[in-house]
Structure formats: structure tokens, C-alpha cells
Amino acid sequence: MIITKSNFFVLTGGPGVGKTTLIRHLRAEGLLCVDETARAVIREQVENGGNAVPWGDTQAYFETVAQRDLAIFDAMAGETRTVLFDRNVVDAACWALAEGITTPPALMAALRARRCNPLVFVAPPWPEIYETDDERRQTWAEAEATFPRVMNALVALDYEPVVLPRASVAERAAFVRERMVVV
């Protein structure tokens, strides 16, 4: 059974391109936002000495993130307000396609069955704001290479990528708000 939530919007893109900053800004403006699970999984794995991290057991990392994203989507299925996700099930499905991750068929079917608004906001690579941290270790080249893979995967999953402008956080927030139309 396909569950479609046209009031669920997704923000995706490579690492270090301003997604979290934009989410924080929009949350401060009163928009209901959901933080990405990938960072939480990395933090927990590092704290507990686990290996389900992008630089370790990529398969276990992907499956852990995807299962959490599914649980969050399902827990919020009754939500009627507009919601912006810092990544979610759409991003997990994109990641599997873009990176060629072996995905158990039942997991991929579950990811594909949770549909968000067809517009997906994509933060492009932006060298002037790019930065790494303990949870985001990808190089600039890896971050830059992520963009076309994400764009192609979104189209393959029948989503319409909307590329964010390289602009101030306030301008990006206005851009997103103007396009968040529930269909």
C-alpha cells in the first residue's frame, strides 16, 4: 500500500551544503522540521563503538538509517501540518539508487511506498560554505559528486528536484516557503 503525504517536503543534497543551517532557520520561523537521522546514527555508533557508519559497515549504516526514517514517516503519517524533513525516506531511497547499495527488496519496497510531496529541495554543492566535521567526513570532491547522483535518483523515483539558490539563509528559506504548496 502506498502512503502519500503531500504535506511532507524533503530537503536533500550532499554534505556540508547548508541543509542543517536552513532547517534551523525555518524551524525558528515556526515551520515543523524533522532533523536527519543519519547524523544521529553516526553519533550513536561512534559513542557505542559501533561500525554502522559511512566509513565502516555502509550496508548496516544504510539499513539503520532507512529503518529509522520509515519509523519516523509512519509515526507522523497522521500529521496534517506542513513538515520539512532534513532528508528522510526519499533520501534513503535515493542514496540506495545513487550509490548502488544492495537493498533488501522489502526495505526498498517500503521506502518506495512512502511518498512525500513530489517537489524535493536539493542543496547544490557550494564550496564557499562547505565544511566537514566529526560526522561529515566526505571530501569536497565526494560532496560535489553527490549532486548529480542525487538529482538522477530523484527523477528515477518520480520526484521533481528543486535546486536551492546559492543565497543567504533567509533568501533560501523564502525560496523554500514560496514553493511549499500542498497538492
Image (cartoon, rainbow, N blue to C red):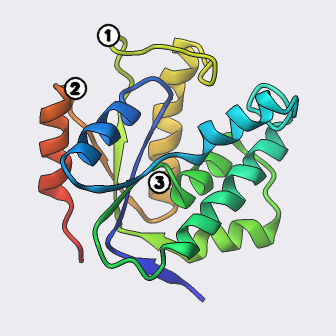
Answer whether labels 1 and 2 touch (C-beta < 8 Å): yes
Q: Pick whichever of labels 3 and 1 is earlier in the sequence.
A: 1
Q: Residues within 10 Å of mark 3 (few under 14, many from 20)?
A: many
Residue found at x 40% / y 35%: 20
Circle 3 residue: 154
- Per the image, label 3 sits on a secondary structure element best described as helix
- Per the image, label 1 sits on a secondary structure element best described as loop
Q: Pick whichever of labels 1 and 2 is earlier in the sequence.
A: 1
Q: Pick whichever of labels 3 and 2 is earlier in the sequence.
A: 3
Give amino acid for label 2. Arg
Which quadrant: the N terminus?
bottom right
Q: Which mark is residue 44?
A: none
Q: Quadrant of residue 67?
A: bottom right
Answer whether labels 3 and 1 touch (C-beta < 8 Å): no
Q: Give the x, y percent position of residue 91.
A: 54, 51
Instruction: Give the CA separation, mark 3 to mark 1.
Output: 25 Å
Give amino acid for label 3. Leu
Circle 1 residue: 128
Residue found at x 58% / y 77%: 113
In this rendering, the answer to whether 37 lies above or below 75 is: above
Q: Give the x, y percent position of residue 44.
A: 74, 37
Question: Which mark lies nearer to you, 3 or 2?
Answer: 2
Circle 2 residue: 166
Residue found at x 53% / y 31%: 146
Q: Give the x, y percent position of residue 70.
A: 63, 66
Instruction: Give the CA separation, mark 1 to mark 2.
Output: 10 Å
Answer whether labels 3 and 2 touch (C-beta < 8 Å): no
Give amino acid for label 1. Glu
